[in-house]
Amino acid sequence: MRVAGRRKAAVVFLVLGICLVAIAVALNVGWILLNLRQVALLVLGVIFFALIITGLILNTIFLVREIRRNEQHDAFLNAITHELKTPIASIRLYLETLKTREVAEDKRLEFYEIMLADSNRLLNTVEQVLQAGQTREGKRLLNISRINLEKLLKESVEIIRSRYNLNKNAIEFVETKNSIKVSGDAAELQAVFTNLLDNAVKYSKNNVKVWVEMKNSDKKKVEIRIKDSGVGIPQNELKRIFKRFYRVPNVSTQKAKGTGLGLYIVRSIVKKHGGKIWVESKGEEKGSTFIVQLPKAVI
């Protein structure tokens, strides 16, 4: 209801702005025609007219941006509420079951595994929100070291395989003959790759298939490509997905829950390491490829 109301408000303000511009143009043209001899007043009139039009346009743009920002904040609050509430409810249900009923040992172990997975999901959400806050305020300091990039990528792949109980064929790491090292914070760079891999799995269809490839971009840079065969991204959304709280507004992606912070955090970390990140996709249902470019460690 709030989103629909704000969209209506945005339309109202846009129509109002257009009407005011049209009236101002009509008045100014009429005034010019009636006062051709009054050059000085004509100049002043044109200046004031330009100021009025500029003010109206800026006001309209500001209102539309604020409405969109509020919509994103509402979407974030709904998403974060779900991401926090769902695992808590699940853990509570299993704990109540264990407390009130006699449960076989194998089932008990299964319940423990589920509760641990839910607690990890809960912890991951909390850490993501905290990390987004630290990233925005620039508080977190990097613990720089020389990192074996291939080893870090393999560790990230194993984390995601374990998280989703995937077989080795689901995420394929393309081996390279070269040993490439980068300078950076190992924990933060691992957060980048696990986040991208997590998204690749989350937005895949039933048959998960992800490829991870590392190659030299040039003598000073290395490129990491994470490709999936999932839901894909519309062309007009490719640049927006790295914004804070932003999630692609289509049915396929909305089925996968999230906070809208992951890619914002990823881009911030990559930029802090002097790198770049972008995404390529031919459209919906055609998969996506995220490319991370990082500077190599100085020998």
Image (cartoon, rainbow, N blue to C red):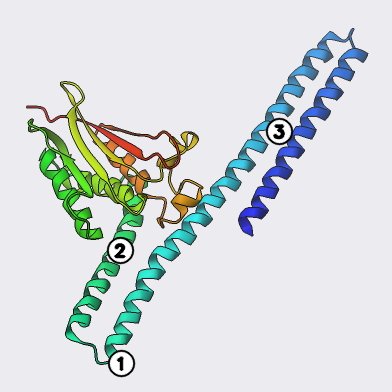
Residue behind mark 1: 100
Please tell me whether residue 48 is drawn above or below residue 205 in the rendered image. above
Question: In the figure, is residue 14 to the left or right of 164?
Answer: right
Classify mark 1: helix, strand or loop. helix
Asked whether residue 141 is in view, the answer is: no
How would you rate the neighbour count of disc 2 (Cα within 10 Å): few for under 14, some for 14-19, many for 20 or more?
some
How would you rate the neighbour count of disc 3 (Cα within 10 Å): few for under 14, some for 14-19, many for 20 or more?
some
Q: Earlier in the sequence, mark 3 or mark 2?
A: 3
Asked whether residue 234 is in view, the answer is: yes
Please tell me whether residue 171 is drawn above or below residue 271 in the rendered image. below
State the residue in front, 273 or 161: 161
State the residue in front, 258 or 62: 258
**What distance separates the C-alpha of mark 3 from that of mark 2?**
47 Å
Amino acid under disc 2: Arg
Q: Can you tell which of label 2 and label 1 is closer to the viewer?
A: 1
Which residue extends farthest front? 207
Cβ–Cβ under 8 Å for marks 3 and 1? no
State the residue in front, 246 or 209: 209
Amino acid under disc 1: Thr
Amino acid under disc 3: Leu
Q: Where in the figure is residue 29, as x and y percent of width and height?
A: 85, 18
Residue 121: mark: 2
Q: Quadrant of the N terminus?
A: bottom right
State the residue in front, 57 or 177: 177
Picture residue at 18% right of the left edge, 81% below the top = 106
Residue behind mark 3: 56
Q: Where in the figure is residue 229, as x and y percent of width and height?
A: 33, 43
Question: In the figure, is residue 47 to the left or right of 27?
Answer: left
